[in-house]
Amino acid sequence: MFLAECVLLFAQLAHLLVNSNFLKEDEEICDLQCEGLVLIQKKSGYSFTTDAVLLANFIKEKEGLTIVEFCAGSGVISILLTAKIHPQKIYAIEIQENMADMCARSVKLNGLKNIEVVNSSFQNFTKNSGAMPNIIVANPPYFKAKEGRLPKKEEVLKARFEIDMDISSLIISAKKMLTSGGSLYLVHRTERKTEIVKELEKQGFYIKKLCYCFPKKSKPSHIFLVQAVLNEKCETEILEPIILCNEDGTETDMIKRIYNRNSAI
């Protein structure tokens, strides 16, 4: 009965937002299943992925930090981090105006006062901002612009392909903003791990934590999560791998826990 009432309440909220012009055309409300947080996203086109949720769950830090998120997109990582590690301040940096606007409306919808959405490239933000973050977080585009068939929708194109940046420029910008001991958290394609780790080490980062993610136990790793610390030598801790699905396609218990489907995180 409680579940049915929640579904009805959520539907009523979505209807109210549509009628109040809070939502734009082709948008919907997504329940993030974490302390009542919600997210505005497109019904078609760009939407957040499991990768973003995994990265938000991977970050284990003390409360009261200042965070900068590069390539914030719809803002799902920044919004989840407000509940998971209770930062003092988050700057959510997004270059696409429409995505930054959608992110800002999600922040307002959740009543979050500690997230500031900035419509800018992370390069310009790094150059012009006086922010001094403890950590930088990024779920950047995975593919080089020359790889594969490029999507026609601009927001999808820039979310998936390195059009306005590349991984080297991201790591260099993170280095400029962080002080020694600060952390850069990334999620990326496993096939690019060697390239990324090499660039991190080149810029003075040391790998502190590494976690491989697998679509199924029988499949190779498709993405990895990494915490890299600037100018502070440390041993690399290889975490328990994350398996998304059982062999029959159902969610693993680990994923259910991460999404808070069967127990509190």
Image: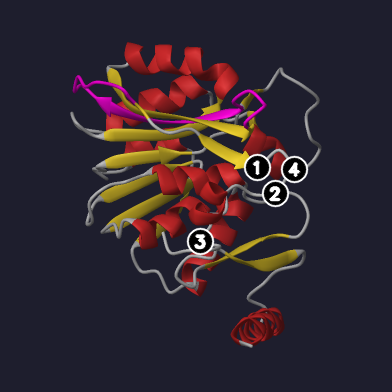
- Residue nearer the viewer, 241 or 196: 241
- The amino acid type, in three-letter code, at marker 1 is Cys
206, above or below 264, in the image: above
- Element at label 1: strand
229, above or below 128, in the image: above
- The amino acid type, in three-letter code, at marker 3 is Asn
Q: Which residue is mark 4?
A: 248
User: Where is residue 183 shown, x and y percent of the image?
Assistant: 29, 34
For label 1, count other residues whose C-alpha is less than 10 Å away and answer few (under 14), some (14-19) or many (20+): some
Labelled pair 2, 1 in contact (Cβ < 8 Å): yes
- Residue nearer the viewer, 47 or 108: 47
Q: Which residue is mark 3?
A: 260
135, above or below 260, in the image: above
- Element at label 2: loop
Q: Which residue is mark 1?
A: 245
Determine the residue positioned at 44% across, 28% down: 170
Q: Quadrant of residue 9?
A: bottom right
Q: Which residue is mark 2?
A: 250
Q: Earlier in the sequence, mark 1 or mark 3?
A: 1
Labelled pair 2, 4 in contact (Cβ < 8 Å): yes
- Element at label 4: loop
For label 3, count other residues whose C-alpha is less than 10 Å away and answer few (under 14), some (14-19) or many (20+): some
Range of magenta residues? 217-237
User: Where is residue 231 shown, x and y percent of the image?
Assistant: 20, 21
- Element at label 3: loop
Q: Which mark is residue 262?
A: none
User: Where is residue 187 shown, x and y percent of the image?
Assistant: 49, 34
Q: CA distance from mark 1 to mark 4?
A: 8 Å
Q: CA distance from mark 2 to mark 4?
A: 6 Å
